[in-house]
């Protein structure tokens, strides 16, 4: 996945996996100083909560001071299990709690993106009617009987969740290696099992109902001063490695700018041409709470993950706001282009990482070590 994003200067800032349910969050480098409080959670719902084949994984963070949460779920399969799907979703929301701040639950965040193999099916119509509607491109006929769309009108837990129009055919179930819907003995009825929705936390004005949004062609919602706009929602029918077809969506988020300055600024006074030049200073904002786990690292230009450092040193000094050191402490003497990054890491009780800050100074995006 990191190579997929290689065309965009980006860094993986969060990952969480529970068996086959995987969530990766990447950020452009320019946004890194303003992503804080990154935490992840996972909830098993398979076999009464003992097995992770079903459930949800999430990652949350503050983006320019606004809490945002990404929730990837794999809910129970089969037409008859609609009630179980809703119960599992509610269980996931109840169990996933985050530390610190005001957004301790998933739905407390300003913006929530909910997606995954949600396994909702098309009711009432038999397989022949469904396939005929697909072949004749009468998708709205099927959309009206989609379990998720209908549940939005009756399930309070789905209140506020919005989805763009399903203008692509159902993405399940296909014969693997083909573009043909299931021809096995089970003959699964096609369905939109793979979905991407979003929710904006209400700040006074009511969120429009799903039907009202569709009537107006609404794909964005402005609540308070934060705006979420969906620019694309599509399937990728060319892929044949699974019995599902992948689905993607493109959004833009507009936030009022709450965070004005990075908490940490790195300073390099001159180009490094010899080892004795290799020193750096960083300034820490007075509002930032230092941790004994804080460290400063040196990276090759083009790194994609915080663990890709060439070397690091601990940023010691409980009250210090400036630290400098010589590169020979790293024992790195290879020519090349490097960047500095300060990464604050805290451990919680179960030793999962929390990354409250990434800071890469644009002024030193290429330090030449010769």
Image (cartoon, rainbow, N blue to C red):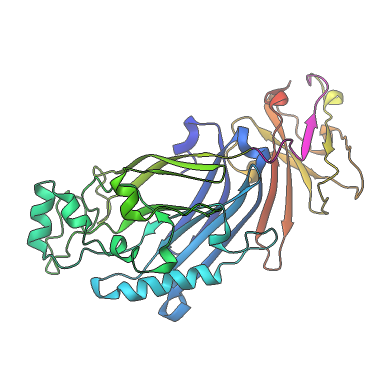
Residue 100 quadrant: bottom right
Q: Where is residue 81 in the image (x, y as percent from the top left)?
A: 30, 74
Is residue 368 positioned above or below 206 on the image? above
Residue 107 placement (x, y as % from top left): 53, 61
> Quadrant of the rendered structure where residue 19 is?
bottom left
The answer to whether residue 109 is left or right of residue 181 is right
The residue stretch that appears in magenta: 257-272
The image shows a total of numbered marks equal to 0
| 47 versus 206 height, above or below | below
- State the image coordinates of residue 38 (x, y, percent, origin top left): 63, 52
The residue sitting at 84% across, 36% down in the picture is 283
Image quadrant holding the C terminus, namely top right
The residue drawn where x is 62% and y is 59% is: 103
- Judging depth in this view, the residue of 27 and 255 nearest the camera is 255
Residue shown at 28% from the left, 43% from the top:
236
**Extreme residue toward the bottom, this view:** 48
Residue 265 covered by magenta stretch: yes
The stretch drawn in magenta includes residue 132: no
- Residue 184 location (% of width, % of height): 13, 64
Q: Main structural element of the magenta stretch: helix, strand or loop?
A: loop
């Amino acid at each position: 996945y990191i190579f997929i994003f290689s065309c965009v200067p980006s860094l993986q800032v969060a990952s969480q996996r529970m068996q086959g349910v995987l969530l990766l969050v990447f950020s452009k480098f320019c946004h890194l100083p303003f992503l804080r409080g990154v935490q992840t959670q996972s909830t098993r719902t398979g076999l009464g909560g003992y097995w992770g084949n079903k459930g949800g994984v999430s990652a949350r963070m503050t983006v320019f001071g606004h809490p945002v949460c990404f929730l990837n779920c794999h809910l129970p399969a089969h037409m008859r299990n609609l009630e179980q799907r809703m119960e599992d979703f509610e269980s996931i929301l109840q169990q996933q709690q985050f530390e610190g701040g005001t957004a301790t639950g998933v739905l407390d965040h300003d913006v929530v993106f909910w997606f995954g193999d949600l396994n909702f099916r098309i009711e009432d119509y038999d397989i022949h009617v469904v396939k005929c509607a697909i072949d004749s491109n009468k998708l709205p006929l099927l959309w009206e009987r989609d379990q998720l769309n209908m549940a939005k009108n009756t399930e309070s837990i789905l209140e506020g969740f919005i989805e763009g129009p399903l203008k692509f055919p159902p993405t399940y179930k296909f014969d693997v290696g083909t573009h043909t819907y299931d021809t096995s003995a089970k003959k699964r009825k096609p369905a939109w099992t793979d979905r991407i929705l979003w929710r904006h936390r209400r700040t006074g004005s009511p969120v429009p109902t799903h039907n009202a949004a569709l009537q107006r062609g609404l794909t964005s919602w402005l609540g308070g001063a934060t705006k979420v706009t969906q620019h694309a929602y599509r399937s990728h029918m060319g892929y044949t490695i699974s019995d599902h077809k992948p689905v993607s969506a493109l959004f833009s988020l507009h936030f009022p700018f709450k965070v004005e300055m990075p908490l940490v600024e790195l300073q390099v006074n001159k180009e490094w041409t010899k080892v004795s030049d290799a020193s750096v200073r960083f300034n820490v904002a007075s509002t930032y709470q230092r941790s004994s786990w804080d460290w400063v690292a040196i990276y090759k230009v083009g790194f994609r993950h915080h663990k890709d450092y060439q070397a690091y040193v601990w940023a010691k000094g409980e009250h210090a706001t400036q630290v400098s050191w010589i590169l020979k402490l790293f024992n790195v003497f290879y020519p090349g282009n490097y960047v500095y990054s300060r990464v604050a890491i805290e451990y919680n009780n179960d030793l999962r990482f929390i990354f409250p800050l990434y800071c890469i100074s644009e002024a030193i995006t290429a330090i030449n070590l010769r």
